[in-house]
Image (tube, rainbow, N blue to C red):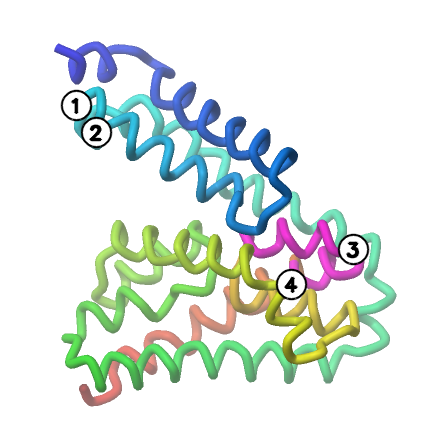
Amino acid sequence: MMNDFVSNSLFFGVFISIAGYSLGLFLKSKIRSALCNPMLISIIFVILFLLVCDISYEAYNSSAKYLSYLLTPTTVCLAVPLYRRLSVLKQNPVAILVGLLSGVAASLLSVYLLSVILGFDRTMLATLLPKSVTTAIGMELASEIGGNGSIAAAVIVVTGVLGNIIADGVCKLFRITHPVAKGLAIGCAAHAVGSARAMELGETEGAMSSLAIAVCGLMTVVLAPIFSNFPI
């Protein structure tokens, strides 16, 4: 009964998702802890809501899928802070590109090595390779190189949320203080979700993180098919 109600309610899933995110924003403003990440709280809230109300994911997704339509234009909007800090890019083009290429190569190589060590098959390897790019790119890329797009989306979200939570701590641990380096590292490792944290650190960090999302996405599209064909 509840599944039918949710399926037939045009924006019920959207409402539940926004309610969970709003709860996350409220908790973050009160507790001020990295663990109170709004997206993480939203995910937990939605999962618990579906379990308690005995609602299937399919029923929820049928009325929540409209949020995914905003994913691509939202990612494009990240170009705004980059445009405001374009002078920084012009001053350091070689260092920025080499740094991002190193980050993408490290991400892909680490996934490949872990897949070999843990005995994953080629399908799982292809699913995990796009873990550090934005969902709009990662899902399609994983499917094209023989992976599972749905699982890839979940892995990408987990990667982004984890990066959002630990980004500041990792930068402090390794004494990374330059705003350009911090922004590039966060965007390269944790895509759009991490960029939200980078923007909280400063406008330059946010701009460089936005740049990293676009450039690393393109680099991953080129390099991931190569890594997916490595012997495993």
Please name the residue that numbered disc 4 is placed on: 168
Task: Provide residue 35's location: percent of width, then percent of height.
Answer: 51, 49
Amino acid type assigned to the residue bearing label 1 in the image: Asp
Image quadrant in which you'd find residue 92: bottom right
Which segment is the magenta one?
192-209
Is 78 magenta? The answer is: no
Q: CA distance from mark 1 to mark 2?
A: 5 Å
Residue 152 vertical placement versus 179 (above, below): above
Amino acid type assigned to the residue bearing label 2 in the image: Leu
Amino acid type assigned to the residue bearing label 3 in the image: Gly
Please name the residue that numbered disc 2 is placed on: 51
Whether tag 4 and tag 3 are in contact, CB under 8 A, the answer is no
Task: Provide residue 145's location: percent of width, then percent of height.
Answer: 27, 68
Task: Provide residue 33's location: percent of width, then percent of height.
Answer: 59, 47
Neighbourhood count class around disc 2 (C-alpha, 10 Å): few under 14, some 14–19, many 20 upward: few
- 177 vs 166, left or right, is right
Image quadrant in which you'd find residue 68: top left
Q: Which mark is residue 202?
A: 3
Residue at 21 percent across and 68 percent down: it is 124
90 vs 48, nearest the viewer: 48
Question: What is the secondary structure assignment of the residue under circle 3?
Answer: loop
Question: What is the secondary structure assignment of the residue under circle 1?
Answer: loop
